[in-house]
Amino acid sequence: MPSRLFDGNPLTSQSGSGMSDNSLGTFESGPSGWKRAGTTDGLRVKVELDRQANALELAYRTYLRHEELALDNSLSALYSAVEGSLAEKGPNQRETAGSQGSEPAQGQHDVVITEEQLAQIFPGGNKDVLSELQRQLQANMKAYGITNEIQLAHFLAQAGHETGGFTKAANVENLNYTTASRLQTIFPKYFGKHKKDPKDYVKNPQALANYVYGNRLGNGAETSGDGYLYRGRGVFQLTGKTNYKAFDDFYHQKHAGSTVNFTENPDLIATDTGYAVESALWYFQLRVSVESIDGLTSVESVTKKVNGGVNGLADRERLFKKALTYLIYLPNGIAQDDK
């Protein structure tokens, strides 16, 4: 919208501000703009006209915001209905479309997820990433314990938050910290009194990873280089040699005959979306016990298992409600004009 709404004679413009046309007197145009007629000093009224224009623009933007809020309120009401329904029903009690009067749907069934649904849930997501995510989920989620929409919604909420709405999925941990104070904040256990000087690890991600991940998570000593080799990768930042080896073993049980080796080549999880998503499904099943998730499982409890805390809880809760809405209540999405 233009920043000014007055392109012609200000006295014939309909400002809607409640000011009468003659409230400022009579005006005439000149080389320096509009001025009051009959004055010797050419009194300009630009400030007053700007004030009126800004008031109109603010009113218009307020109107648009009200329209947005109306939609937000409608979706919030739907989300509330989703939550209320889940509080009353577990996954075994939910009726599928067209099943009125029939037996309740079983808790385990073949869940269908489409690219269109993922695009609705993650409108800012990378199209190629969402396409591969859909392919991996449809092919593998049942094998990793996801057998109903509630479980899938929890997975998408956690994974969506960790990937910034699936702008990418094959991520690698960024350990390139630029200040000593930031290192002390993120790794207080390793930097402080009687501990190593954080200045030695500023802008030194390899040394930092070897220090903070050495002698733990199955990694060798700091000098082994395992800390950096097995730093975080993928959707949930798979970290440590023990975890890479465990995923490697499970992957080969599931994909008999595969020659891929994540222990020898961990960067595969940071460069291939398919491997990143499947490693996330494995980690989610391992950490959360997917089979135990039902309609009463809170996002907070799942977040603590995935994250170790409640970082980003509000966003994870928002994504869970949105995912569940599009998976169950609006499986075909909503019209563009209704968004």
Image (tube, rainbow, N blue to C red):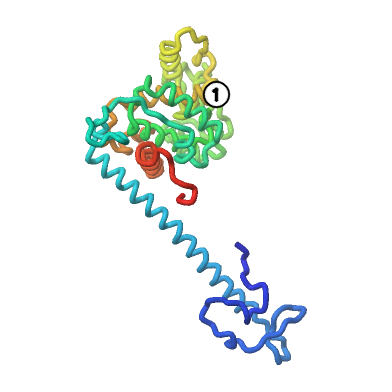
Asked where in the image residue 140 lies, by quadrant, the reply is: top left
Q: Camera-side residue: 153 or 218? A: 153
Q: Camera-side residue: 247 or 272? A: 272
Q: Is residue 95 left or right of residue 328?
A: left
**Residue furthest toward the right?**
31
**Residue at the location (22% across, 30% down)?**
103
Q: Measured along the vertical axis of the image, is residue 315 above or below residue 144?
A: below
Location of residue 81 in the rendering, given as x and y in whole percent from the top left corner = 30, 46
**Residue at the location (52% across, 9% down)?**
259
Asked where in the image residue 303 lies, by quadrant, the reply is: top left
**Residue at the location (73% across, 91% down)?**
40
Location of residue 307 in the rendering, given as x and y in whole percent from the top left corner = 38, 33
Q: Amino acid at mark 1?
A: Asp
Q: Measured along the vertical axis of the image, is residue 257 above or below residue 302?
A: above
Q: Camera-side residue: 276 or 135? A: 135
Give the position of the N terminus as an image quadrant.
Answer: bottom right
Location of residue 264 in the rendering, given as x and y in whole percent from the top left corner = 52, 13
**Residue furthest toward the top?**
257
Location of mark 1 (residue) = 272
